[in-house]
Amino acid sequence: MSTLALYIGAALAEIAGCFAVWVWARNGGSALWLGPGLLSLALFAWLLTRTGIDFAGRAYAAYGGVYIAASLVWLWAIEDQGPDRWDVIGAAVCLVGAGIILLAPRG
């Protein structure tokens, strides 16, 4: 599986897990949200370990850009709140940074 596919899967798992906790803690949802939320967060962490990147810090740094973009997709698709131009510009800058971290030639 490609690093980008793993990052997208990890982002969806992390966002879903965090959203489950958000629903419980901020929206007064049932504590039953916590079980699936914790499983989703565990899946997120496991998926990050599947990347071919040799150092955890570099994997996490590059993942951050994908997470930011995926969070805005979640905002739009799940929370029905479209990102504004500043959200889009910020996400694009982050994705460029993630690309530099992932694709830079290293010795």
Image (spheres, helix red, strand yellow):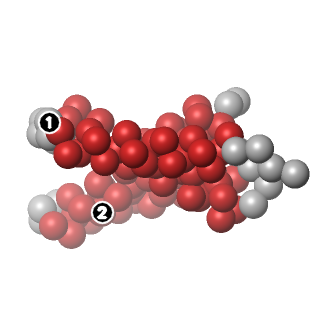
Give me the residue at 65% from left, 44% from top: 102
Task: Tell which of 104 and 15 is nearer to you.
Answer: 104
- The answer for how far apart the CA atoms under marks 2 and 1 are is 22 Å
25 up-or-down from 88: above or below: below
Q: Mark on residue 20?
A: none
**Callout 1 amino acid:** Gly
> In this rendering, does residue 45 appear at all?
no
Residue at left offset 35%, top offset 58%: 18
Q: 88 above or below 94?
A: above
Dots 2, 1 in contact, CB < 8 A: no
Camera-side residue of 77 and 86:
86
**Location of residue 94 in the rendering, given as x and y in whole percent from the top left corner:** 42, 48
Residue 60 in picture, x, y percent from top left: 59, 58
Image point (65%, 64%), residue name:
57
Crowd band around label 2 with a 10 angstrom C-alpha radius: few (<14), some (14–19), many (20+): many
- How many numbered discs? 2
Q: Residues within 10 Å of mark 1 (few under 14, many from 20)?
A: few
Q: Earlier in the sequence, mark 2 or mark 1?
A: 2
Q: Residue at coordinates 46% horizontally, 42% vertically from top-left?
A: 95
* Residue 52 relative to residue 41: left or right: right
Image spot of residue 48 (x, y percent)? 63, 51
**Foreground tag (2 vs 1):** 1
Q: Quadrant of residue 28?
A: bottom left
8 sits to left or right of 18: right
For the residue pair 61 and 32, the one nearer the viewer reads as: 61
Percent position of residue 36, x then y: 40, 53
Please say whether residue 7 is visible from this viewpoint.
Answer: yes
Q: Which residue is mark 1?
A: 82
The residue at which mark 2 appears reads as 21
- Establish if 94 lies above or below 18: above
Q: Amino acid at mark 2?
A: Val
Q: Is residue 28 above or below residue 100?
A: below
